[in-house]
Image (cartoon, rainbow, N blue to C red):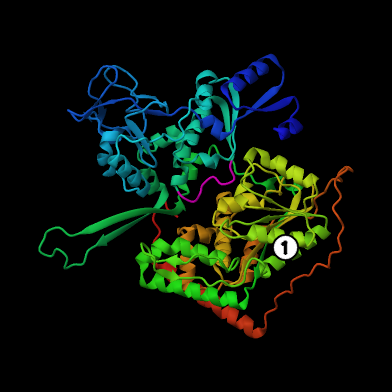
């Protein structure tokens, strides 16, 4: 809102939280001569009263009756048929256009939820509405463990108290705007459009607002999350007519995923001697979706209404930007224990694939965080037992410093010497990295603060400004807390002490201070990792995914095309890297990030006016120590070339086995 007033003349931005505030703001707009921007959060637009089924269950006939006329509820068996059947219990899991009202008298079959009044219907998480007397029937319709546990509790105690979470006595702001202000709004700007790509209440609220404005602009830094299902609901909310014309009904997302995505189908058949005397043979079919989106999605649905812009398109106004990976070496004792843990996982992956699938995520997380905190790590247990697969050994404690901490301290020293502030990202909440770094930097005399999730989202920008006014030099934060909504221009040196697996979080957090209104000449992002560990493999995969994101946005590269053809998820790829035992090259990772850098040496930096600001103390700082450049000998060059040739041969062999399916990447 502050940026609106600073950028546009005769314009005001107002935060709207209720219907009363909206009506008052619109009245002021009608009477005044200013352009008004009503800023509404996605939570306030969605929040409203919840609705539950109002139909009555007739236990004698085993059917549902209309609360108005009393007739038995009948519903069409499908969208493309005229056959009507008696409504089954699962028909009222959620409200839709088929079960919205009685076809006999027009009476609504859904009503508002009053949390203070007992109801014959119970809302089961990850399933929907269930009648108290029909929990057994619902248990046959789902395999979700959380839903099954809740249904079992309802079955054992049908008259128990089951509060409806999220029910409130409030009319949704999006529904009110749709009914009263349809056609009166000149435009709608939807920020972070990708957050409405799920089948959720926030997405439905966005769809209601989408139909009220004359013009709509949706903005996002990551349009597709890599899966075709990640854009299905978004396309239906913005281009429903195109989806219907393409023969993709909303009730059947599998049709869309099959044509425009990558679906893996696994057929499992029993041994040939099984049931040899029978005509039937035991088999099992399992499908799962893999990353990958067909280019036809863009040509058919997005080409005429999508523009890809990046900050580099405003080149003269941007500072230089570079991401710099820095390799660190583990202590000898930590490296020995790490290799033991890694070797144990490889044994499990090769000997017991079923157990490996259940422990893979926890094991990879352990291998990722152990080099940062080689103590106080929980053991990995065999599935459904208390038998440990591996118990990590404690090496050192919170006062023990590794090379990562030393490198972080060097970067902070250099930044303070250049009168810059540093932003440090720590992604793993299970470690004590934040407190360790704060103690280290505070003992060195640098004013360091930690931004936690206890500070409300709406208060974080003010909190940062107050700390800056008090002389803060270093800010430590989890990147998920600042990935959207904050411009941290005061920090021009960013350090990823640790990194997660979410590409969107990495892209957003790394560009928090790379903004059009950034006055500094350059922004540098350092990414620390330990060599020959899961951290290095993760960074390599993230670099390839970043190249894919650039490919989708029109920035083509060989790395992006190669990564686009690899349709495995992050966990599967990291497990694959571990099994193959490929030793990554540090220079290759650095080169990948170097290609994505943005250089603007001729940028004219305006001289800022002299403003009274708190003066940062000039402390005696040692000279910046540049890490020695790695020089290869002739023997090392020969080994490197041989390894590269061997790697290319392995890729060629795997490529021959890969079959491309039409319309799929």
Extreme residue in the top direction: 31
Q: Is residue 223 magenta?
A: yes
Q: Nearer the viewer, residue 286 or 354?
A: 354
Q: Magenta stretch mostly in which secondary structure?
A: loop
Q: Is residue 378 visible?
A: yes
Q: Residue at x 62, y 49 (%)?
A: 508
The image position of residue 401, as x and y in percent, is 67, 69
Q: Residue at x 62, y 73 (%)?
A: 330
Q: Is residue 516 visible?
A: no
For residue 293, above or below residue 61: below
The image position of residue 542, as x and y in percent, is 56, 59
Q: Secondary structure at mark 1?
A: helix
Q: Nearer the viewer, residue 70 or 261?
A: 70
The image position of residue 613, as x and y in percent, is 85, 45
The image position of residue 219, as x and y in percent, is 59, 39
Q: Residue at x 77, y 46 (%)?
A: 468
Q: Quadrant of residue 327?
A: bottom right
Question: Magenta segment, which residues?
Answer: 220-227
Q: Quadrant of residue 431?
A: bottom right
Extreme residue in the bottom direction: 635
- Which residue has dot 1 on it? 440
Quadrant for the C terminus in the image: bottom left
In the image, taking residue 598 as reference, residue 583 lies left or right, namely left
Quadrant for the N terminus in the image: top right
């Amino acid at each position: 809102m502050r940026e609106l007033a600073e950028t546009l003349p005769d314009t005001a931005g107002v935060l709207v939280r209720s219907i009363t505030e909206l009506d008052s703001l619109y009245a002021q707009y009608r009477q005044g001569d200013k352009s008004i921007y009503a800023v509404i959060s996605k939570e306030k637009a969605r929040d409203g009263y919840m609705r539950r089924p109002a139909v009555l269950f007739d236990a004698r006939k085993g059917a549902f009756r209309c609360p108005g006329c009393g007739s038995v509820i009948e519903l069409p068996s499908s969208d493309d048929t005229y056959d009507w059947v008696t409504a089954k219990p699962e028909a009222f899991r959620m409200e839709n256009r088929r079960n919205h009202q009685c076809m006999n008298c027009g009476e609504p079959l859904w009503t508002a939820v009053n949390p203070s009044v007992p109801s014959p219907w119970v809302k089961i998480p990850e399933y929907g509405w269930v009648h108290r007397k029909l929990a057994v029937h619902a248990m046959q319709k789902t395999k979700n463990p959380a839903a099954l546990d809740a249904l079992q509790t309802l079955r054992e105690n049908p008259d128990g108290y089951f509060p409806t979470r999220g029910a409130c006595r409030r009319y949704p702001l999006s529904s009110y705007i749709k009914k009263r202000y349809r056609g009166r709004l000149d435009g709608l700007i939807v920020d972070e459009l990708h957050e409405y790509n799920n089948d959720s209440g926030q997405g439905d609220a966005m769809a209601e607002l989408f139909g009220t404005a004359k013009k709509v602009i949706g903005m996002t830094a990551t349009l597709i999350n890599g899966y075709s299902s990640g854009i299905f609901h978004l396309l239906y909310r913005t281009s429903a007519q195109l989806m219907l014309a393409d023969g993709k009904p909303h009730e059947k997302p599998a049709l869309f995923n099959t044509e425009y995505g990558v679906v893996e189908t696994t057929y499992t058949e029993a041994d040939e001697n099984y049931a040899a005397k029978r005509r039937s043979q035991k088999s099992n079919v399992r499908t799962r979706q893999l990353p990958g989106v067909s280019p036809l999605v863009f040509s058919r649905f997005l080409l005429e209404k999508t523009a890809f812009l990046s900050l580099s398109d405003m080149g003269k106004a941007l500072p230089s930007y570079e991401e710099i990976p820095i390799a660190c070496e583990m202590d000898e004792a930590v490296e020995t224990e790490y290799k033991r843990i890694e070797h144990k996982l490889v044994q499990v992956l090769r000997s017991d694939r079923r157990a490996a699938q259940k422990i893979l995520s926890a094991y990879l997380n352990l291998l990722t965080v152990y080099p940062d905190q080689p103590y106080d790590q929980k053991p990995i247990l065999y599935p459904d037992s208390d038998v440990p697969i591996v118990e990590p050994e404690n090496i050192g404690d919170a006062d023990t410093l590794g090379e990562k901490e030393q490198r972080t301290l060097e970067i902070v020293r250099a930044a303070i010497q250049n009168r810059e502030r540093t932003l440090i990202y720590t992604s793993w909440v299970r470690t004590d990295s934040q407190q360790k770094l704060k103690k280290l930097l505070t003992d060195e005399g640098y004013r360091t603060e930690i931004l936690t999730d206890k500070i409300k989202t709406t208060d974080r920008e003010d909190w940062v400004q107050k700390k800056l006014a008090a002389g803060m030099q270093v800010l430590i934060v989890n990147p998920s807390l600042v990935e959207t909504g904050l411009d941290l221009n005061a920090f021009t040196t960013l350090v990823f002490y640790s990194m997660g697996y979410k590409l969107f979080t990495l892209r957003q957090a790394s560009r928090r201070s790379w903004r059009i209104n950034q006055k500094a000449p350059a922004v540098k992002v350092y990414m620390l990792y330990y060599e020959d560990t899961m951290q290095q493999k993760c960074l390599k995969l993230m670099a390839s995914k970043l190249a894919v994101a650039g490919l989708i946005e029109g920035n083509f590269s060989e790395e992006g095309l190669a990564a686009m053809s690899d349709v495995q998820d992050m966990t599967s790829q990291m497990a694959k890297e571990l099994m193959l035992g490929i030793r990554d090259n540090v220079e290759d990772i650095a080169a990948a990030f170097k290609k994505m850098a943005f250089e603007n040496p001729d940028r004219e930096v305006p001289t800022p006016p002299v403003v009274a600001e708190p003066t940062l103390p000039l402390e005696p700082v040692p000279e910046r120590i540049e890490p020695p450049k790695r020089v290869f000998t002739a023997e090392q060059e020969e080994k490197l070339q041989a390894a590269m040739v061997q790697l290319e041969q392995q890729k060629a062999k795997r490529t021959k086995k890969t079959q491309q399916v039409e319309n799929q990447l």
